[in-house]
Image (cartoon, helix red, strand yellow):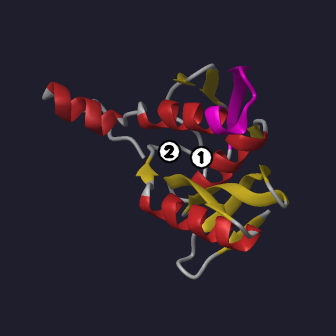
């Protein structure tokens, strides 16, 4: 489910979960929502919201996602280089792809890439397929990416040719 919010961000619901707590009178249900928010230009964040109603859980998750946004380097609609992100038992391989490939990814990683504005990428979830851990692993990989400009500044060197 994709929608634009009032800030022009892309919101995607990755996972909705209904949890039950057994009490004296029966079961009490609450909901948790995992949401990804991005601007389509390299900024993306995720959030987890819990509430007794679905819309409230989604609203909380969206607010947390907006606050946790990070910037990732995008080079010609794909990533600058291949990387593997890990979180818990989840590992996600992210590889750049040539123009026209599209987003080859499973649910959680696909939502992150579409919200971030990546158009061509090859991904593979290794280990667990739990959406929470796969999402956090994808973010770990994306946060570890650095642009050529960042690396050259760290090394105190000039780039041979300026990159787009």
Query: Does residue 158 show up?
Result: no
Q: Which mark is residue 115?
A: none
Q: Is residue 53 left or right of residue 89?
A: right
Task: Judge from the rendering whether residue 148 lies leftward or rightward of residue 118; answer left or right.
Answer: left
Percent x, y for residue 95? 62, 26
Q: Tell me: 43 left or right of 125.
A: left
Question: Hey, which quadrant is residue 136 in on the image?
Answer: top right
Q: Report the quarter where the N terminus lies.
A: bottom right
Q: Which residue is mark 2?
A: 74
Based on the picture, tell me whether residue 62 belongs to the magenta stretch. Answer: no
Q: Residue furthest left?
A: 156
Q: Position of residue 41 (x, y in %)?
A: 52, 58
Question: On screen, 24 above or below 132?
Answer: below
Marks 1/2 in contact by CB < 8 Å: the verdict is: yes
> Can the viewer see residue 130?
yes
Identify which residue is drawn at 43% across, 61% down.
67
Q: Residue at x 67, y 35 (%)?
A: 121
The residue labelled by disc 1 is 77
Residue 9 lies, in percent from the top left, at: 57, 69
Q: Which residues are magenta?
A: 120-133
Q: Secondary structure at mark 1?
A: loop
Q: Secondary structure at mark 2?
A: loop
Q: In the rendered image, which quarter is residue 162 located in?
A: top left
Residue extending furthest toward the front: 24
Q: Residues within 10 Å of mark 2 (few under 14, many from 20)?
A: many
Kindly report the distance in space between the C-alpha atoms of the residues bearing marks 1 and 2: 6 Å
The structure residue drawn at horizontal position 65% and vertical position 32%, both measured from the top left corner, is: 134
Q: In the displayed structure, would residue 49 be above or below residue 130?
A: below
Rendered residue at 62%/19% (across/down): 89
């Amino acid at each position: 489910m994709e929608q634009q919010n009032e800030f022009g961000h892309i919101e995607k619901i990755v996972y909705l979960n209904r949890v039950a707590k057994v009490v004296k009178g029966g079961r009490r249900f609450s909901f948790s929502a995992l949401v990804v928010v991005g601007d389509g230009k390299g900024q993306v964040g995720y959030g987890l919201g819990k509430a007794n109603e679905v819309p409230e859980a989604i609203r909380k998750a969206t607010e947390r996602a907006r606050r946790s946004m990070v910037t990732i380097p995008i080079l010609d609609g794909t990533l600058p280089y291949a990387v593997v992100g890990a979180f818990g038992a989840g590992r996600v391989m992210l590889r750049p792809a040539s123009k026209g490939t599209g987003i080859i990814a499973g649910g959680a990683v696909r939502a992150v890439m579409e919200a971030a504005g990546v158009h061509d990428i090859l991904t593979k979830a290794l280990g667990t397929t739990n959406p929470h851990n796969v999402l956090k692993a994808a973010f770990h990989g994306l946060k570890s990416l650095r642009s050529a400009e960042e690396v050259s500044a760290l090394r105190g060197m000039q780039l041979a040719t300026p990159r787009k």
